[in-house]
Amino acid sequence: MNRTTQSTLLGLLLALGGGTISAAELRVDVTGVESANGEILAALYDKTDTWLKKPLKRDIVAATKGTTLIVFTDLPAGDYALSVFHDTDGDKKMGRNVLGVPTEPFGFSRDASGLFGPPSFDEAKVAVPAAGATATIKLKN
């Protein structure tokens, strides 16, 4: 196959949508933010085995009293789970007491909560279609 034929074939594939990759957007409304002090840290996960260990994406946004918006872009359609917390002291770490219980407001997608610890990926997962989605997470104290 010569170069002209290869270019023509590539152009035809692109025109038919063979080269189109759609990317979804996940908008996250974090509610129950009690003050504008600090930042909201969010972590997005796409697999059970990386849940709460290695996020696919992270974001940090200034806290807005009431509701803080976080937007994740360029996501393939699929299932995702989120964890967020309000970093009120600015150290970029979830504050915990001596028993390991969080001392800063936190939350998970679908407002999931575990019995004696965090929820599972399946309990927190949200479906994100190619058209995108919106999730709401209410912070807990």
Image (cartoon, grey):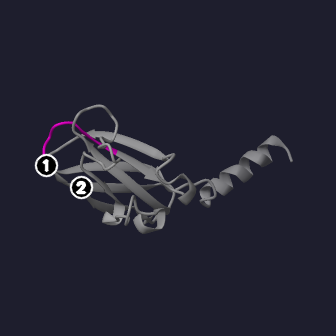
- Nearest the viewer among 49 and 31 is 49
Q: Return the residue found at the far right.
A: 1
Mark 2: which amino acid?
Answer: Leu
- Residue at mark 1 to residue at mark 2: CA–CA distance: 9 Å
**Residue 74 position within the rendered picture, expressed as x and y whole percent measured from the top left:** 46, 49
What secondary structure is marked by label 1? loop
Tell whether 41 sits left or right of 68.
right
* Nearest to the observer: residue 102 or residue 125: 102
Q: Residue at x 45, y 66 (%)?
A: 129
Residue 9 among magenta residues? no
Instruction: Spot the residue most to the front.
Output: 98
Q: Which residue is mark 1?
A: 34
Residue underneath mark 2: 139
Residue 37 magenta = yes
Residue 99: where, in percent of width, then height? Answer: 33, 48
Kind of element beneath mark 2: loop
Callout 1 crowding tier (Cα within 10 Å): few <14, some 14–19, many ≥20: some
Considering the whole magenta stretch, tell me its main secondary structure: loop
Q: Which residues are magenta?
A: 34-41
44 relative to 111 in the view: left or right: right
Residue drawn 21% across the image and 53% down it: 141
Q: Amino acid at mark 1?
A: Glu
Please tell me whether residue 23 is drawn above or below residue 41 in the rendered image. Answer: below
Q: Is residue 47 above or below residue 93?
A: below
Task: State the residue at coordinates (59%, 59%).
Answer: 17
Where residue 140 appears, as percent x and y from the top left, is 23, 56
